[in-house]
Image (spheres, rainbow, N blue to C red):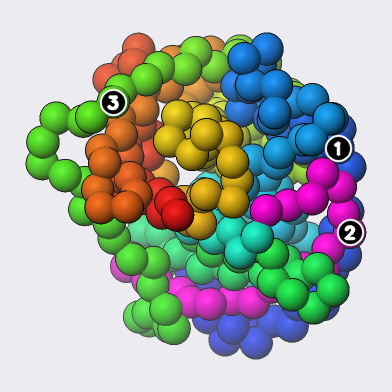
């Protein structure tokens, strides 16, 4: 069923309060592959919070029913995250959300919903999330409305660095403790109903693995050096698979892609990191 653009664009989002503690930021880092060699990201003394943790603080799917979006048909299409200043080890922030745009892929195809959430601390912006939701079968509503996510080109040369990260078979069971309870990540029946052979990794978890790798390898584990990270989701990653990430130095930042080693399948494309 096509999404209803008027219903979506007129939906009113109430301002939310979102709180977190050190243990939440540490759990996120552990889910993203941090370990004994990543003490600044997992130890409370001088804890540094991975910038992409802001996506978990921004996450909210409670509005979807009221806006006519079926959660069972939603998968992540992409993320564009911007850090305005580093996160404290714990805080209570105000989250302000809006529908920034819709993209119609055609009848029987997907409808894309661009959701923007800005986290504020005392009136000052800390973090902006632009999340593209891929609504299966949601196209055919009559054309694009508002903004559309941009496309970043990957360099046509060999990567400057390639790294691999073996994911845990139980990764979604841990990551859902941070708030995203979508059943397709843990229930085989829900995953099959969404068109997957089995549960898939949370897209935000896969994205966070790449963010941590970039933070540690190119920014000295200093969140203040990472201003933006963005990518589109090209395909699912299954729990237990190995994620291979390719990085290219480009200007003052990076480009990246990522794929599942075992299947030779793309997972993230058009990746961008802005450093400085």
The residue where tag 2 is placed is: 92
Quarter of the figure that contains the C terminus: bottom left
* Residue at 87%, 54% in the rendered image: 91
Gap in angstroms between the C-alphas marked 3 and 2: 37 Å
- The residue closer to the viewer here, 177 or 18, is 18
Q: Position of residue 150 (x, y in %)?
A: 33, 66
Q: Earlier in the sequence, mark 3 or mark 2?
A: 2
CA–CA distance in space, label 1 to label 2: 12 Å
Label 2 element class = strand
Give residue 159's mark. Answer: none
Residue 22 - label? 1
Pinpoint residue 120: horizontal percent, then vertical percent: 76, 70
Q: Specify whether 75 is left or right of 64.
A: left
Q: Secondary structure at mark 3?
A: strand
Compare marks 1 and 2 and give the one earlier in the sequence. 1
3 and 2 marks in contact (CB < 8 Å): no
Residue 123 percent location from the top left of the image: 80, 78
Magenta highlight: main SS: strand
On the rendered structure, is 271 left or right of 69? left
Provide the secondary structure element on which disc 1 rests. helix
Quarter residue 6 falls in: bottom right
Q: Residues within 10 Å of mark 2 (few under 14, many from 20)?
A: some
Q: Which residues are magenta?
A: 86-107
- Is 104 colored magenta in this rendering? yes
Observer-nearest of 73 and 119: 119
Residue found farthest to the left: 156
**Residue 177 vs residue 190, the one in the foreground:** 177
Q: Quadrant of residue 128?
A: bottom right
Tell me, yes or no, if residue 138 can be seen here: no
- Give the class, few, some or many, for how many residues have Cα within 10 Å of label 1's Cα (few <14, many ≥20): some
Task: Tell me the residue that label 3 is attached to.
Answer: 161
* Figure check: 58 above or below 9: above
């Amino acid at each position: 069923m096509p999404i209803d653009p008027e219903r979506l664009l007129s939906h009113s989002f109430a301002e939310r309060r979102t709180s977190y503690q050190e243990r939440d930021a540490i759990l996120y880092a552990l889910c993203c592959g941090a370990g004994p060699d990543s003490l600044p990201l997992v130890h409370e003394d001088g804890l540094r919070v991975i910038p992409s943790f802001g996506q978990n603080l921004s996450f909210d799917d409670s509005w979807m029913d009221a806006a006519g979006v079926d959660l069972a048909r939603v998968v992540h299409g992409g993320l564009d995250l911007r850090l305005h200043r580093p996160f404290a080890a714990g805080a209570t922030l105000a989250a302000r959300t809006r529908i920034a745009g819709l993209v119609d892929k055609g009848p029987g195809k997907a409808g894309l919903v661009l959701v923007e959430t800005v986290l504020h601390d005392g009136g000052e912006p800390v973090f902006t999330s632009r999340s593209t939701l891929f609504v299966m079968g949601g196209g055919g509503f009559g054309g694009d409305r508002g903004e559309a996510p941009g496309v970043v080109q990957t360099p046509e040369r060999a990567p400057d660095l390639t790294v691999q990260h073996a994911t845990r078979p139980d990764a979604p069971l841990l990551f859902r403790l941070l708030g995203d309870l979508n059943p397709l990540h843990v229930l085989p029946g829900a995953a099959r109903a969404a068109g997957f052979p089995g549960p898939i990794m949370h897209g935000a978890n896969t994205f966070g693995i790449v963010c941590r790798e970039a933070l540690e390898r190119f920014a000295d584990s200093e969140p203040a050096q990472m201003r933006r990270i963005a990518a589109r989701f090209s395909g699912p990653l299954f729990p237990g698979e190995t994620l291979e990430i390719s990085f290219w130095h480009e200007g003052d930042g990076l480009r990246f892609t990522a794929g599942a080693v075992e299947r030779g399948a793309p997972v993230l494309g058009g990746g961008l990191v802005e450093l400085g």
